[in-house]
Amino acid sequence: MRYFAELSYLGKNYHGWQIQPNAISVQEVVQNTLTTILRTPTEVVAAGRTDSGVHASQMFIHFDTDVELISDIHCYKINSLLPYDVVFHKLFKVNSEAHTRFHATKRSYEYRILLGKSPFTTDIQWQINKKLNIDAMNKSASFLLDYTDFKCFSRSKTDVRTYNCDIYRAEWILNGNELVFHISADRFLRNMVRAIVGTLYNVGLGKIKPEEIRTIIESQNRINAGASAPAHGLFLTEITYPDTIKNGI
């Protein structure tokens, strides 16, 4: 039987999602916990890979097991063994071909900036004490929807077949002194969101004009984009699947 699981985690203490040879990862602690609960080695497949220090308020994984799982009961058991910064929210059975990565139709991220300083959010917001032109940042963000090739925002030497992504939303929203960048697409490249945020930050500072985003994208060269924003402000917030792959929610 194949199950999907919805979980969330704080990325501060982990070297990303994917298992690393000499560093702790979210995948490692999740697999170890499931192996203990299910009493058999259990490998999981995630909807994506978050980088070191990046958080997820919604992540989906899938795994196969012969054990009939009850969401409330088994989430409680799993959470009792997991560290405090990883939490399972629900489990549900899916058809045997359902895949968390390949069947996801949309992914959404938020990048959170605090315009000021606070001792309480240093791990989940990029704290900035500079005045930003948010209108200019939003104008630049709107240009992203006109393109599909985002090689300029991809980590160098990334092994991918294509740099194409369909972006559905790219918008900055200010709420009090918190500035949040919302971006949704069918897929994302490694480091893409942080590179976009770092580039739009330069627009906000007036270092580049909004229209120059077009030149940067069309150059297809990472060196022309801005430095990546810090990892700790980034959250994977939503992953969407077609209802047709589910049969037991």
Image (cartoon, rainbow, N blue to C red):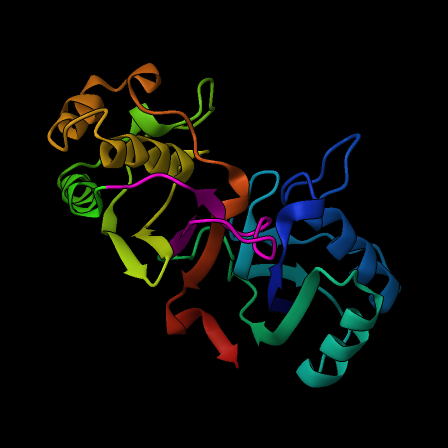
The relative height of residue 100 versus residue 214 in the rendered view (above or below) is below
For the point 14% across and 43% down, the residue is 139
Q: Residue at x 68, y 67 (%)?
A: 87
Residue 229 in view here? yes
Pinpoint residue 82: horizontal percent, then vertical percent.
79, 63
Assign the N terminus to one quadrant of the image: bottom right
Q: How many marks?
A: 0
Vertical order, 155 against 105 (above or below): above
- Residue nearest the observer in this picture, 139 or 161: 139
Between 161 and 235, which is closer to the camera in this rendering? 235
Residue 113 in the magenta stretch? The answer is yes
Q: Residue at x 66, y 47 (%)?
A: 12
- The picture places residue 152, in percent across and down from the top left corner, at 30, 24
Task: Give the vertical position of 94 relative to 232 (above or below).
Answer: below
Picture coordinates of residue 52 (x, y %)? 61, 38
In this rendering, would 78 be left or right of 106?
Answer: right
Could one spot residue 1 in this view of the protein? Answer: no
Verify whether residue 117 appears in magenta: yes
Above or below, comparing residue 91 to residue 196 in the picture: below
Depth order, front residue of 151/233: 233
**Left/right of residue 186 with respect to residue 34 in the rendered view:** left
Q: Residue at x 72, y 76 (%)?
A: 75
Relative image position of residue 133 (x, y in whole percent): 21, 42
What segment carries the magenta color?
107-132
